[in-house]
Image: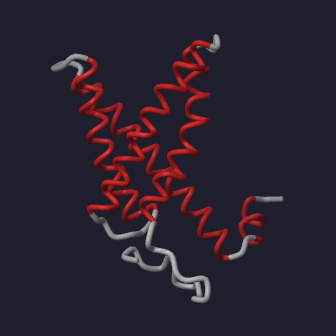
């Protein structure tokens, strides 16, 4: 079965969810590239930890706005921003703990990082999605035909 056939067999709700996951992945890749580029640019001026922190902040800022307007198509708000920051604090903690755990269990650095991402990316998606879409949903009795048509729901 081709991907097109698979997508065509999905109902509208599942198709929208798949598109949301794909947009999340695209934003994540761009955010990662931003962090790496900023980090490498700042290495000539700052130590590694400060360069990484500033790269993470720039990446996180991009990620918030891209997640708001592109991935989840919701209005930016203080509560969504706070939830986004909380989800990323949880994600950063989970990354640190899981990476340390996989290294302690004997995985090499590259394998441990890959395993860490296998754990953290889905968790981060669910956390970010929860905080970004909270309050966006409709009552079960309402139609979901327009649930993703407007970026300002």
Q: Quadrant of the N terminus?
A: bottom right
In the rendered image, residue 151, in percent from the top left (x then y), is placed at 39, 74
Q: Is residue 135 left or right of residue 139?
A: left
Q: Is residue 33 above or below residue 52?
A: below
For this orientation, the residue located farthest to the right is 1
Identify which residue, 94 or 46, lies in the foreground: 94
For this orientation, the residue located farthest to the left is 45
Identify which residue, 25 or 75, lies in the foreground: 75
Q: Is residue 85 above or below residue 11?
A: above
Q: What residue is rendered at 28% in x and 65% in y?
A: 77
In the rendered image, residue 139, in percent from the top left (x then y), is placed at 55, 83
Q: How many marks?
A: 0
In the rendered image, residue 54, in percent from the top left (x then y), is placed at 24, 33
Q: Is residue 2 left or right of residue 128?
A: right
Q: Is residue 81 above or below residue 114?
A: below
Q: Is residue 31 above or below residue 54?
A: below
Q: Quadrant of residue 17?
A: bottom right
Q: Is residue 25 left or right of residue 58?
A: right
Q: What residue is rendered at 57% in x and 88% in y?
A: 142
Q: Quadrant of residue 145?
A: bottom right
């Amino acid at each position: 079965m081709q991907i097109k056939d698979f997508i065509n067999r999905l109902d509208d709700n599942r198709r929208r969810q798949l598109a949301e996951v794909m947009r999340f992945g695209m934003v994540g890749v761009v955010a990662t590239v931003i962090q790496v580029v900023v980090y490498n640019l700042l290495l000539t001026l700052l130590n590694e930890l400060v360069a990484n922190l500033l790269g993470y902040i720039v990446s996180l800022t991009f990620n918030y706005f891209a997640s708001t307007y592109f991935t989840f198509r919701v209005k930016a708000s203080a509560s969504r921003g706070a939830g986004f920051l909380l989800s990323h604090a949880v994600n950063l903690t989970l990354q640190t703990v899981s990476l340390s755990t996989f290294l302690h269990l004997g995985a090499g650095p590259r394998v441990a990082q890959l395993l860490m991402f296998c754990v953290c990316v889905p968790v981060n998606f669910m956390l970010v999605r929860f905080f970004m879409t909270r309050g966006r949903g409709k009552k079960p009795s309402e139609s979901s035909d327009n649930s993703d048509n407007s970026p300002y729901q």
